[in-house]
């Protein structure tokens, strides 16, 4: 689907030639002398329609309007929430046969800029269809959407960001929706490699042999029960100078999770193809970065493997050694996501990140706590937490900060290792985050538990592409903030060599101490 931004008054919208004109009408709408205002006045006067959010009135070949079809769409208060409700409900009109070009007019809204992202996202969702293994699926005819606003210049930057974010979100949805036999770790690695065709993106894929050399015993342990070889994917986007510390994103890439020896119930196990949505979101973020080219450095790390109950699989009670040197008693093989993540969080230290964010469909407990509205967010610094919360609010890809009190880690104690990989049932999402925290040292770190938001169940089953909008907005905000900082002047070193200077080279980073 192609998007364009157009400067349109209500009179201009009435004259726009298209198959469908969607006019969002808020409660604050004031009629002027134009054909669309006349239609609104007549409909309201006869009580056939109201401006409440989501209320619709379809018209055909209306007088004075060039579009063949018109949809008057109530936008309520004009808030982001009301506009999302309205446009989500208009999906069937946008997907209707014969609608190849639609104009969605936001010109009657007081603040079109604030709802730009949600407008583009809702329209893109309406046109999306999964087809890889469903070739008979009916595709929407719509190919072009023009977004009409009063002031094109004031909206252009937000429009471009919204289109890029939506492209990234669509990529994440596509890979999230693919069945596990069409989204193996190797296939996921190939998808990452394809991103290098874009400027400033590089990709390196580490094999199981490489992972073994790195000492990633926890990651290897999860993968050992599968015939599919693990893939450790390392993406980088370089949009700033190499002196700027990167933001590192770590996405959980369990392409299918049976639970291993701690086998999951059969009902709903097909949905465990979505257990790589954290990895898919990292791919989506890099797709958006490729389009926007912001001045920031980003590293994306994806540990990809399957969790299977083979004869070689890890068993409850096994003890493995992580890359950090800390040992882990595997009390439940279905708590595998934290095992692959912990080694990659240790690996991330080498980049000396400005911020480290991991994204994972980690715990069912987070679904119980927050449902499908907000992702769980844990952060060890106030600044990082506020940045993520703000990015979520801007894009309506919401998260909620959860606690990291040390008392929650008590249940992770083990008699046979430095820690167990699970605690009790209580606070399961929090104890999982406390487990991960032991592998981040003093880095500014956040964990997004997207188990409730990465996909939908029921008739609308499918990946959502979240939290791509939140993450991209976070990176754009970080880029803008870095641009406002003046570079510090650094004194030239007195000598090129440390020899005889009385200084010592920096000692190697030690593994973080276990909290007891």
Image (spheres, helix red, strand yellow):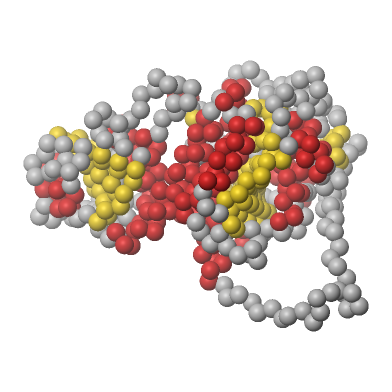
Q: Which of 203 and 505 is in front in this view?
A: 203
Image location of residue 263, percent across then percent down: 71, 21
The answer to whether residue 200 is left or right of residue 217 is left
* Residue 253 in view here: yes
Q: In this view, does 87 lie to the left or right of 506?
A: left
User: Which residue occupies the extreme left position in the image?
Assistant: 63
Q: Give the x, y percent position of residue 514.
A: 84, 49
The answer to whether 69 appears left or right of 506 in the picture is left
Give me the residue at 85% from left, 39% from top: 321
Quarter residue 340 falls in: top right
Residue at x-position 91% and y-position 37%: 415
Q: In which quarter of the image is residue 494?
A: bottom right
Residue 328 seen from this side: no
Task: Return the x and y of residue 136 as percentages of the image width and height.
Answer: 40, 19
338 or 226, which lies in front? 226
- The answer to whether 277 appears left or right of 72 in the picture is right
Residue at image position (25%, 34%) is 99
- At horizontal 36% and vertical 39% (from top left) the residue drawn is 1
């Amino acid at each position: 689907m192609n998007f364009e931004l157009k400067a349109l008054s209500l009179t201009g919208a009435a004259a726009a030639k298209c198959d469908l004109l969607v006019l969002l009408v808020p409660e604050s709408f004031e009629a002027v002398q134009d054909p669309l205002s006349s239609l609104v006045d007549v409909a309201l006067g006869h009580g056939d329609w109201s401006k409440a959010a989501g209320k619709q009135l379809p018209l055909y070949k209306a007088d004075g309007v060039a579009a063949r079809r018109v949809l008057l769409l109530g936008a309520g208060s004009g808030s982001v929430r009301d506009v999302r409700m309205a446009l989500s409900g208009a999906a069937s009109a946008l997907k209707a046969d014969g609608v190849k070009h639609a104009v969605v007019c936001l010109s009657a809204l007081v603040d079109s800029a604030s709802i730009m992202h949600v407008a583009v996202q809702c329209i893109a969702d309406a046109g999306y269809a999964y087809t890889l293994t469903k070739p008979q699926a009916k595709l929407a005819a719509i190919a072009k959407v023009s977004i009409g606003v009063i002031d094109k210049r004031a909206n252009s930057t937000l429009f471009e960001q919204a289109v890029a974010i939506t492209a990234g979100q669509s990529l994440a949805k596509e890979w999230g929706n693919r069945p596990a036999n069409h989204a193996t770790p190797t296939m996921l690695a190939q998808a990452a490699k394809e991103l290098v065709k874009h400027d400033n993106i590089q990709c390196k894929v580490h094999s199981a042999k490489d992972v073994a050399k790195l000492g990633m015993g926890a990651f290897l342990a999860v993968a050992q029960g599968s015939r599919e070889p693990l893939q450790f994917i390392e993406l980088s986007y370089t949009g700033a100078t190499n002196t700027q510390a990167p933001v590192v994103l770590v996405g959980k890439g369990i392409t299918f999770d049976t639970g291993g020896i701690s086998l999951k119930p059969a009902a709903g196990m097909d949905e465990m193809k979505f257990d790589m949505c954290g990895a898919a979101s990292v791919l989506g973020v890099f797709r958006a970065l490729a389009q926007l080219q912001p001045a920031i450095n980003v590293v994306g790390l994806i540990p990809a493997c399957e969790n299977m109950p083979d004869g070689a699989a890890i068993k409850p009670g096994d003890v493995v050694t992580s890359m950090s040197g800390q040992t882990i008693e595997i009390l439940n093989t279905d708590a595998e996501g934290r095992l692959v993540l912990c080694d990659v969080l240790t690996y991330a230290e080498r980049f000396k990140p400005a911020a480290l964010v991991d994204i994972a469909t980690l715990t069912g407990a987070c679904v119980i706590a927050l449902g499908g509205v907000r992702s769980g967010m844990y952060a060890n610094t106030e600044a990082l937490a506020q940045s993520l919360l703000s990015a979520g609010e801007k894009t309506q890809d919401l998260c909620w900060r959860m606690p990291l009190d040390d008392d929650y880690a008590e249940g992770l104690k083990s008699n046979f290792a430095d820690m167990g990989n699970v605690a009790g049932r209580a606070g399961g999402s929090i104890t999982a985050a406390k487990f991960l925290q032991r592998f981040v040292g003093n880095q500014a770190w956040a964990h997004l538990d997207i188990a409730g938001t990465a996909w939908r169940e029921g008739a609308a089953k499918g990946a959502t592409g979240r939290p791509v909008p939140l993450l991209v907005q976070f990176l754009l905000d970080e880029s803008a903030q870095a641009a406002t900082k003046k570079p510090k002047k650094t004194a030239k070193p007195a000598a090129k060599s440390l020899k005889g200077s009385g200084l010592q080279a920096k000692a190697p980073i030690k593994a973080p101490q276990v909290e007891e």
